Amino acid sequence: MSAVRNKLLVLNAGSSSLKYKLFQLGENSALKAVASGVCERIGDPAASFHRGKAGGGGEQKQEAPLPNHTAALEVVSKFLGDSFRGDFTEEVFGVGHRVVHGREISEPVLITDKVRATIEKAADLAPLHNPPNLMGIDAAKSTFASAPHVAVFDTAFHQTMPPEAFMYALPYELYVERAIRRYGFHGTSYKYLTQQAARMLGKPESETNLVICHLGAGSSMCAVKNGRSVDTTMGLTPLEGLMMGTRCGDIDPAIIPYLASHGMGMKEVDTLLNKKSGFLGLAGNADLRNHLEARFGPGSATADERSKLAVDVYVRRVRKYLGAYFMHLDGQVDAIVFSAGIGENSAPMRREFVRGMEFAGVKMDDAENARAAGGVQADVSAAGSKVKLLVIPTDEELSIAQQTLQVIREEKGTAAAA
Ligand code: ADP
């Protein structure tokens, strides 16, 4: 009997990790997550492992030597095969890949040789992300050879930004000849969060204005007007804007030639800005959790000054863009949305971001805010707050799955019509 091809796999390949979520297509195009997991420490076979759960079972952890992404995908396929059926790979009718940068390609697309080449070319604009994304694509294309593979780009949601938001004040030729402009990232997250926020507000997306804060190890914000991105904090690369775990965000660009004139090579500067700055650079550790106690804990009066400083720099940057985006939206903001690791989990940080914003119609319910964490949607605004404060766990994988399904269906429609 031939396999029922009703499963869609979403892959998000990082430099040393491979996250996945498997969806089953049900009635009315509903996509139900039936398995998820991650391979970590790929490239370090002595320490690498896989964690996954499938079909309502608990999480399983397996130590597994994973020299590369192909080996990781084999472990994932075996796990899913054992959890569902042996011919599981035949049940997968499509694979959706998160790809960070697509240069001029913004819509989700079928990964042809030409599209693959564009993703490869864009690697210089997203050096931390595009090369591992390609490793994931190559590994998956050999494992799921008969399924269509679709790339969903982090930049896509921001294609609606007006020129005054995406242009740098550089010589215009750099835009024309080298496509140097602001692209923005975390687009699949913003797309999903916009849908969910509109639903929570009971409004159509096309009439919903939001300031969305996607605050994780990588952090960015987005101004959404009538359901579409009109500005975002990241730029040509995911380095611009907010301070992050290891990235500096906005700096005076003159710092770069200054460092170069003092003997630092360009590669070194690049590593400094992308991998040694942010929380790590200011306070020695990239994870906000290690600095919260110093800033908010009972012993904060005597705690590590650098941890406190790092938290305050982070908060100030978020507040600066909150102010800017309220202006972009003419003060007509339905909700501020908090998401990703910091936005979803840290009540004291959310409190700081909106402190004193009553003048703009923003009032927080501190008890609700303190309660909101752990992967559930919450409205943490006080009664009568003109602007709602929403905590929404992001689900980039579901967003990628929905977009992948749409591309596969459109391709089938085109093929049938041809
Ligand atoms: P990314 O997807 O960009 O890798 P995540 O959205 O998973 O990042 O967020 C990870 C970050 O979220 C961690 O580095 C940590 O700083 C922060 N984080 C996670 N949980 C908490 C928490 N309970 N309190 C504060 N910060 C947290």
Image: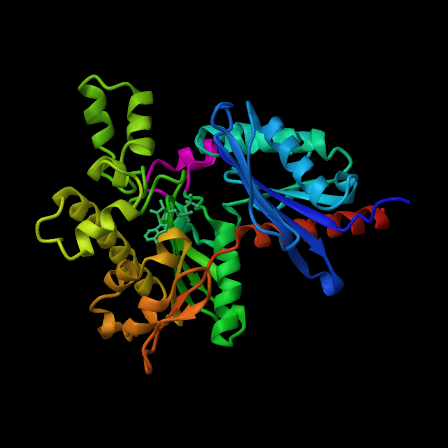
- Figure quadrant of residue 259: top left
| Colour logic | rainbow
The answer to whether residue 18 is seen in the rendering is: no
Judge by depth and name the residue closer to the eye, 164 or 295: 295
320, above or below 210, in the image: above
- Residue 212 can be seen, yes or no: yes
Is residue 321 located in the magenta-colored stretch of the structure?
Answer: no
> Relative to 245, is 197 on the left or the right?
right
Q: Name, please, the residue furthest toward the right.
A: 1
Question: What residue lies at 41% left-to-right and 43% top-to-bottom?
Answer: 182
Question: Which residue shows up at 59% across the image and 50% down it?
Answer: 400
Image quadrant in which you'd find residue 272:
top left
Which residue is farthest left? 302
Q: Whole-percent x and y of residue 80?
A: 68, 42
Q: Residue at x 62, y 52 (%)?
A: 57
Furthest residue to the bottom?
Answer: 384
The quadrant of the picture occupied by the N terminus is top right
**Up/down of 76 relative to 390, above or below:** above
Magenta residue span: 168-181
Residue 62 position within the rendered picture, expressed as x and y whole percent measured from the top left = 56, 35
Residue sitting nearer the eye, 325 or 16: 16
Number of marks in the image?
0
Q: Position of residue 178 (x, y in %)?
A: 45, 31
Instruction: Report whether 341 appears left or right of 187.
Output: left
Magenta span includes 173: yes
Where does the image place residue 5, in percent across and percent down from the top left?
A: 79, 48
